[in-house]
Image (tube, rainbow, N blue to C red):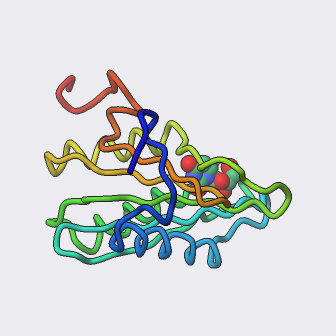
Amino acid sequence: MRNSLNQSQYSQLNLLDQALVDKAVAMTDTAYAPYSGFLVGAAVQLNNGVVLGGCNQENASYPLCMCGERVALYNAAANYPHQSVVSLAIVARNPRKKLTQPVSPCGACRQVIAEYESRYGSDIRIILKGETNDVIIFDTIKELLPYGFDGTFL
Ligand code: THU
């Protein structure tokens, strides 16, 4: 059950989506974030049913830090290049401050998610969660990145 803002509760998700969120939460345990301490976990559900995870990878050279959702998407694209991405769960944990709202993907990650929608010609469902049971679901990245730049301009 979702309201008009796409808000829902973890307990209201179907079992497949709950498992995807669970995988993303588990991925926060292996996040490498010694500089920010902000732990991001992500999980992708592929068309063939495979679920793959990712988490943020930081670097002493700060601009080289890589977001968790991009690690998950690149993991999937590298290992299953012919399987479209059906759903992507993104969660975060902040040991310094409890995240009372679902985490919102950064602009760079929105652009990368859009690339995979274009690549596979299908929408990617995006499930966001923080440290409470509140979740927000988007049926396509176009809701989060309207009028985006894509390969049709090139
Ligand atoms: N981060 C993500 O992993 N995903 C986002 O969408 C936003 C930010 C990471 C990058 C960095 O390691 C830490 O969170 C703080 O910005």
Work out whether residue 132 or residue 27 is closer to the camera in this orientation and state it.
Answer: 132
Find residue 51 and report its image quarter. bottom left
Instruction: Identify the residue at horizontal 26%, vertical 31% (top origin).
Output: 150
Q: Where is residue 9 in the image (x, y as percent from the top left)?
A: 51, 56
Seen in the picture, residue 85 relative to 121 is either above or below; the reply is below
**Given the current orientation, which residue lies at the most extreme right position?**
96
| Residue 64, placed above or below residue 76 | above
Q: Can you see residue 65?
A: no
- Return the x and y of residue 91 as percentages of the image width and height: 56, 60
Task: Name the quadrant containing residue 81.
Answer: bottom left
* Of 116 and 153, the residue lying toward us: 116
**In the image: residue 3, left or right of residue 123:** right
Instruction: Find residue 33 and report its horizontal and vertical position in percent.
Output: 71, 65
Q: Residue at x 40, y 45 (%)?
A: 2
Q: Is residue 154 visible?
A: yes
The quadrant in which the C terminus is found is top left
Q: What residue do we see at 83% from left, 55% from top?
A: 97
